[in-house]
């Protein structure tokens, strides 16, 4: 295995349990670094509602087989065997009660029990194939019948992400679906940066829509743009130049109250954070008493709040993205074994493959499921 992250360690454990002689090569000084920083340090390790429609891929069916073979309940069972406490935060998202370190320690113990050898701080210099795969590395040469690439995506390069997996795929003639940052905040264009200056920290529930998908969750104004779960989710579907349609009043409406003498801004601030309502009316011709707002005008104001057409300048990029969308084209791989059709004995699992989960534990579930599945065959 190359890469001691979620997918690589799971695959190593499963292959080790089958009596295979397994070595994991990791270029960082420690294993599972991304697991350690995940979920704010508590690792959102799975989602109870995992289904294939929580994943993006050029082939939306590819993930189904692995997700059916290794389910959230399987990983929960593993955690419970180690008496690791966890809780459901919201929407089926399971987090460790204590720390993501519990998950990494579990994987390390399972590796030890399965006789898996882990070599950290190891650089792979070259890979070639004759009968077997031959690797030149900083820890010496290795030879193997099965080589698993589990080097993850491009997000957060400062903790060890590299394009290594994609380079190996290309070396063996495998197609790559173009990579892009996903689950990432979106940046204001210059005009919006001025219009929404000073709102950092304001948060409200919205429907955010792009690329045909809508997410109803919290949105957060930042100093540079928009973030929060609704925006991270929709960023995976957003393409440069396209708008994100934001409904600031999801499922709500501005209704004229009987017998109250208030301003339109006050009415809106009953449904929106006050700072946002104040700014909205500053930007849209000012506030006035409701008595001076016709029914038609009230409908127009309501419609504008339901349909804010936000055109981001860009995403925050791989520095802030939780995952990389795109990757090794699933058409090149078996959905059952993860073996490359053009290169027998070469496997790709986890985030390096063109399967990207929504926010909420789905990406780890994909790493466990793809690692488990390949681990039955390598
Ligand atoms: P992963 O990135 O885990 O592992 C790849 C390994 O390969 C790393 O150890 C890396 O150092 C190593 N490697 C890379 N290049 C190499 C090379 N050339 N040679 C040797 N080794 C190499 N998901 C989720 O479901 N719930 C969550 O709570 C979160 N939270 C979260 C927070 C943050 C800040 C980020 C950035 C990401 C998340 N994610 C997440 C996403 C999740 O972390 C990610 O999808 C999985 O870790 C992917 O698992 P992999 O094993 O495929 O890659």
Image (cartoon, helix red, strand yellow):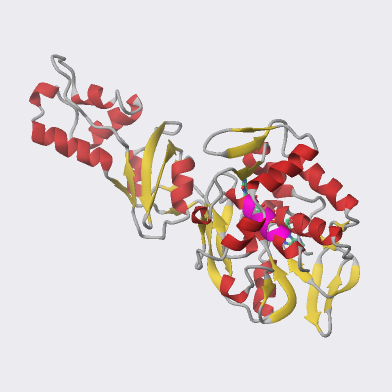
Residue 33 in percent (x, y) is at: 73, 48
Give the residue drawn at x 17%, y 20%: 257
Q: Which quadrant holds the N terminus?
A: bottom right
Q: Which quadrant holds the C terminus?
A: bottom right
Give the residue drawn at x 16%, y 15%: 260
Q: Which SS type dominates the magenta stretch?
A: helix
Q: Is residue 254 left or right of residue 340?
A: left
Magenta stretch encompasses residue 367? yes
Q: In this view, does 134 lie to the left or right of 212?
A: right
Residue 241 in percent (x, y) is at: 36, 60
Q: Is residue 232 left or right of residue 103?
A: left
Q: Is residue 357 visible?
A: yes
Give the residue drawn at x 73%, y 74%: 346
Q: What stretch is highlighted in magenta?
A: 365-372
| Location of residue 296 with respect to 12 vertically, above or below | above
Residue 47 in percent (x, y) is at: 59, 44
Residue 210 in percent (x, y) is at: 37, 54
| Location of residue 193 with respect to 59 vertically, above or below | above
Magenta stretch encompasses residue 267? no
Q: Is 308 or 158 nearer to us in this picture? A: 308
């Amino acid at each position: 295995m190359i890469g001691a992250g979620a997918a690589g360690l799971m695959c190593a454990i499963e292959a080790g349990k089958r009596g295979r002689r397994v070595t994991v090569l990791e270029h960082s000084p420690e294993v599972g670094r991304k697991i350690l920083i995940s979920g704010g340090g508590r690792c959102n390790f799975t989602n109870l509602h995992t289904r294939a429609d929580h994943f993006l891929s050029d082939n939306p069916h590819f993930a189904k087989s692995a997700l059916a073979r290794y389910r959230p309940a399987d990983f929960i069972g593993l955690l419970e065997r180690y008496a690791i406490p966890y809780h459901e935060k919201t929407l089926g998202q399971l987090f460790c009660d204590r720390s993501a370190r519990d998950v990494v320690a579990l994987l390390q113990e399972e590796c030890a029990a399965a006789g898996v050898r882990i070599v950290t701080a190891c650089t792979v210099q070259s890979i070639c194939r004759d009968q077997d795969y031959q690797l030149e590395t900083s820890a010496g040469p290795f030879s193997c019948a099965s080589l698993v690439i589990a080097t993850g995506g491009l997000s957060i390069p400062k903790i060890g992400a590299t394009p290594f997996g994609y380079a190996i795929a290309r070396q063996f003639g495998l197609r790559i679906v173009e990579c892009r940052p996903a689950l990432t905040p979106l940046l204001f264009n210059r005009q919006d940066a001025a219009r929404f200056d000073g709102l950092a920290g304001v948060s409200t529930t919205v429907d955010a829509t792009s690329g045909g998908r809508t997410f109803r969750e919290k949105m957060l104004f930042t100093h540079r743009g928009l973030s929060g779960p609704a925006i991270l989710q929709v960023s995976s579907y957003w393409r440069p130049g396209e708008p994100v349609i934001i409904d600031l009043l999801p499922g709500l409406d501005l209704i004229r109250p009987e017998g109250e003498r208030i301003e339109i801004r006050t009415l809106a601030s009953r449904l929106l954070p006050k700072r946002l309502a104040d700014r909205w009316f500053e930007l849209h011709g000012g506030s006035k008493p409701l008595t001076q707002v016709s029914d038609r005008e009230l409908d127009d104001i309501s419609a504008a709040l339901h349909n804010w057409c936000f055109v981001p300048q860009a995403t925050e990029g791989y520095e802030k993205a939780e995952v990389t969308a795109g990757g090794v084209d699933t058409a090149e791989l078996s959905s059952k074994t993860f073996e490359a059709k053009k290169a027998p004995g070469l496997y790709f699992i986890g985030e390096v493959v063109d399967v990207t989960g929504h926010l909420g534990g789905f990406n780890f579930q994909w790493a466990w499921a793809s690692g488990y599945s390949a681990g039955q065959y390598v």
